[in-house]
Image (spheres, rainbow, N blue to C red):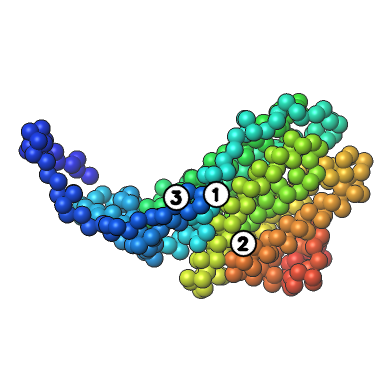
């Protein structure tokens, strides 16, 4: 790309006070279209008015020019590859962005680290193993959107802005769980190949749609369920606050992914088999995760309050949690417009869910170990 030509004649005229002012006289904006702040302030939805609020189905150019501005004909091409609204859009993305920026918290200041009590060594190790897993998996939800965000056309800037908040959220989650593992003397636990394999599946997704379905619908949905359970089984109020704060962030990410898939399928129902295939592969990975001691047993130990009790009460609690994970996952799929009950790959013996009660008819689910 050639460097822009400097108009030296204009430079000399401007020095002598001879301004051009065509930008002022030839104004083509919607003059008088005025945004009105809502109760919480001036939101992105408040300024989505007139032509400025019209999101194109296909972006007319690949530039960083603000949507609605008057663009030079010779602006450079930025090389964006996600140039359709169905690629990234969700009808709730503006509201989720506003919530994301208003509810940021600090893993340094907002957690009462000095109040962590000394707990039984087995419980400490269980908490640290769970924190190791969560510190590991949370960063994929930063790395994946960061990999694709620069490819998203600027006409869908609200989606890019929301993903920027997600990147910050997930960095903070990785931070807070790493800090908890190291704050009370337990240290980091084991990282398993099966976990890394799922993360690689997401990061190596061939397109944004595939990675988003695997990460937002399946992976982050599972983590959201773990956060809910973590608040319940935490050994002290410190961990309860960690899980509660992370939960509010994760709920936004899952809400975006669910509504993004819903929008994509509503606009093009013929893509449903494509998304089914994405989730087929992801569920097989999740099944292996549910059969991993380093994932299941820390939850059982924390739920029971001891190693001795984990085999009975804790095991039942872990089964209930995994069953809840499956139920919530199927509900998200329903909201997104994709019915997984006839295809789910996670056997009911792993999640300990009532296949019949949930309307699951998949052979792979109801006969998993037969």
- Circles 1 and 3: CB atoms closer than 8 Å: no
Left or right: where does residue 53 sit relative to residue 287? left
Which residue is painted at 37% across and 52% down in the image? 154
Q: Earlier in the sequence, mark 3 or mark 2?
A: 3
Which numbered dot is residue 42?
A: 3
Residue 348, given in percent of the width and then of the height, sits at: 79, 63
> Height in image: 39 above or below 237?
below
> Height in image: 358 above or below 65?
below
> Height in image: 23 above or below 305?
below
Mark 2 closeness class: few <14, some 14–19, many ≥20 residues within 10 Å: many
In whole angstroms, how far apart are the C-alphas of marks 3 and 2?
38 Å
Left or right: where does residue 63 sit relative to residue 113? left
**Which quadrant: the C terminus?**
bottom right
In front of the other: label 1 or label 3?
A: 3
Q: Earlier in the sequence, mark 1 or mark 3?
A: 3
Number of marks in picture = 3
Left or right: where does residue 307 sit relative to residue 93? right
Mark 1 highlights which residue? 99
Which residue is painted at 86% across and 31% down in the image? 120
In whole angstroms, how far apart are the C-alphas of marks 1 and 2?
28 Å
Left or right: where does residue 20 sit relative to residue 350? left
> Is there any visible trace of residue 192 in the rendered image?
no
* Residue at disc 1, secondary structure: helix
Which residue is painted at 81% across and 37% down in the image? 235
Mark 1 closeness class: few <14, some 14–19, many ≥20 residues within 10 Å: some
Which residue is painted at 61% across and 69% down in the image? 338
> Is there any visible trace of residue 1 in the rendered image?
yes
- Location of residue 358 by image quarter: bottom right
Which numbered dot is residue 279?
A: 2
* Residue at disc 3, secondary structure: loop
């Amino acid at each position: 790309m050639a460097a822009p030509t400097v108009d030296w004649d204009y430079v000399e005229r401007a020095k002598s006070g001879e301004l051009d002012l065509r930008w002022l006289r030839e104004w083509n904006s919607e003059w008088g279209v005025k945004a009105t702040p809502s109760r919480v302030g001036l939101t992105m939805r408040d300024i989505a008015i007139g032509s400025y609020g019209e999101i194109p189905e296909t972006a007319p150019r690949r530039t960083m020019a603000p949507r609605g501005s008057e663009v030079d004909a010779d602006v450079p091409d930025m090389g964006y590859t996600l140039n359709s609204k169905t690629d990234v859009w969700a009808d709730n993305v503006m509201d989720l962005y506003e919530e994301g920026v208003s509810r940021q918290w600090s893993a340094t200041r907002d957690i009462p680290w000095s109040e962590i009590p000394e707990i039984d060594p087995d419980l400490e190790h269980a908490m640290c193993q769970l924190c190791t897993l969560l510190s590991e998996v949370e960063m994929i939800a930063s790395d994946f959107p960061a990999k694709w965000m620069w490819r998203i056309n600027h006409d869908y800037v609200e989606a890019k802005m929301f993903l920027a908040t997600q990147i910050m959220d997930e960095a903070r989650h990785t931070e807070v769980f790493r800090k908890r593992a190291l704050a009370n003397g337990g240290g980091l636990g084991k990282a398993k190949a099966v976990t890394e394999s799922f993360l690689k599946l997401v990061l190596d997704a061939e397109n944004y749609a595939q990675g988003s379905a695997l990460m937002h619908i399946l992976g982050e949905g599972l983590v959201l369920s773990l956060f809910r359970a973590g608040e319940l089984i935490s050994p002290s109020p410190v961990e309860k606050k960690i899980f509660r704060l992370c939960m509010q962030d994760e709920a936004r990410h899952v809400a975006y992914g669910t509504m993004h898939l819903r929008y994509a399928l509503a606009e093009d129902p013929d893509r449903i088999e494509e998304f089914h295939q994405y989730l087929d592969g992801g569920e097989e990975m999740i099944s292996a995760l549910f059969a991993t001691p380093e994932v299941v047993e820390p939850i059982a130990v924390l739920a029971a309050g001891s190693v001795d009790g984990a085999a009975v009460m804790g095991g039942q609690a872990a089964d209930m949690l995994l069953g809840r994970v499956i139920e919530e996952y199927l509900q998200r799929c329903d909201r997104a417009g994709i019915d997984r009950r006839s295809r789910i790959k996670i056997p009911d013996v792993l999640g300990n869910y009532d296949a019949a009660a949930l309307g699951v008819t998949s052979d792979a689910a109801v006969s998993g170990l037969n």
